[in-house]
Image (cartoon, grey):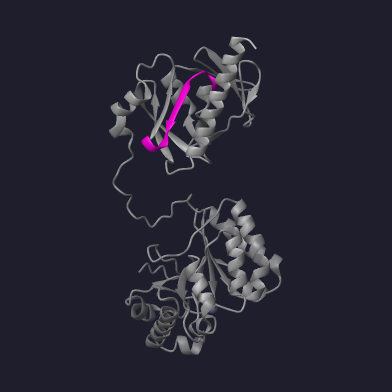
Amino acid sequence: MTIKKAMLLFFSFLLCLGVVQTTASATGANAELKLGVNDKLSGITAVSVKGSYYVPLRALAAELKWTITGLPDGIQVDGGGRKLLLLKGNGGAQLQDRTTAPMNTFVKNGTLMVQLKISAYLGYIISFEPDKYLLRVRDASAALDDAAFLSQYKSELHPSTTPAKPSQTPAGKPGKTLYMTFDDGPSATTSELLDILDKYGVKATFFMLGPNMNRYPAEVKRIVKEGNGLGLHGMTHRKDKFYASPSAALAEMSGDNAVLQKIAGTGTTLIRPPYGSKPYFTKSFRDKVLVQGYHLWDWNVDSDDWKYKENSAKIYNTVMNQVHGLQKSKTNPVVLMHDQKATLKVLPRLLESLKKEGYTFEIITKDLQPLNFWKDHR
Ligand SMILES: [Zn+2]
């Protein structure tokens, strides 16, 4: 083996190492890092997606004086004395020696984002020290070593130390956070329902009835223990009793909360009146109940699972159609289902599809703006 060949191999090894390190460490907390370019801190923010850092190609090219040329096969990038071709359709990067290396791109707000390792393919050195918030690209023109660079930009590299304000908006993409809710439980099949949620890593919110909690206390405890959301659904589930008067409705919710408190050692302020809040849960009811600190939650996706029972296809289509309908307005779905045996049949398929479509699942908490048919945001 010639020395030149050995050097090349060694260099490829380093390159791999760099890439591997980037991938492994990027799973940490740094979703974004300010990019250092040679001896200065650029205005470029590198964004971590699935364990890899991406930067806007045009901005990086401007910093490093690269030339970008559009060709029929893709985009040619000349820089650092080398060139490569970003093949169309995420086909990777064709390097100067005609080999193809993996390279992902995506478009964000009209800007082409490329993996930062594109600079390594052009012969630059990438430094990455996540615990110091260092992400830097350099070539032979850089005078500072990483330690000197770090000491010069320490305060600017560090993300703001003031904690983010609690927000009512979930962290995920707009419209892609989904709240599964199960009414009328717990039941004889709650543990199977929890097994399915567990399998898919999904948490849901349970609006439970007092008498059913008394009947299935172990299920209540497991719902709580596994981090699911807790809500109240009343005691009788009878229209004539629950809606007899505002005081009757409040008594049902307080009684329900007392049962939850007794079994789980914790209460909740989330409520969902039986059959939903419209038309019966009128202003006089809401004034009476919500002034006690309760938050009223209905839904915007109705599975009708109580009606279709074993007809899983029908339930599946009903949910998916409504979920897709909400995408236009980027509205987060709140899906109404029931803690019943028939629902178990459709649930895995539903969760699988929703996950595939990029939905993340959250529980309802008292800090979210309540979604209800009256638009009562108390
Ligand atoms: Zn119900």
The quadrant the C terminus occupies is bottom left
Residue 307 vertical position relative to residue 122 in the rendered view, above or below: below
The residue nearer to you, when weighing 264 against 335, is 264
Question: Which image quadrant for residue 370?
Answer: bottom left
Q: Quadrant of ligand 1?
A: bottom right
* The residue stretch that appears in magenta: 121-132
Q: Position of residue 186 (x, y in %)?
A: 55, 77
Residue at position x 46%, y 73% from top?
Answer: 231
Q: Residue at x 50, y 77 (%)?
A: 208
Instruction: Say which residue appears at 51% left-offset and 12% top-offset.
Output: 81
Q: Nearer the viewer, residue 253 or 249?
A: 253
Relative to 236, residue 77 above or below: above
Is 77 displayed left or right of 266 in the figure?
right
**What is the quadrant of residue 36 in the picture?**
top left
Question: In this view of the protein, can residue 321 be seen by the observer?
Answer: no
Q: Residue at x 56, y 27 (%)?
A: 16
* Residue 54 x/y as whole percent: 49, 33
51 horizontally vs 286: left or right: right
Q: Is residue 216 visible?
A: yes
Task: From the viewer's side, name the closer residue of 304 and 43.
Answer: 43
Query: Measured along the vertical axis of the image, is residue 202 above or below residue 244?
Result: above
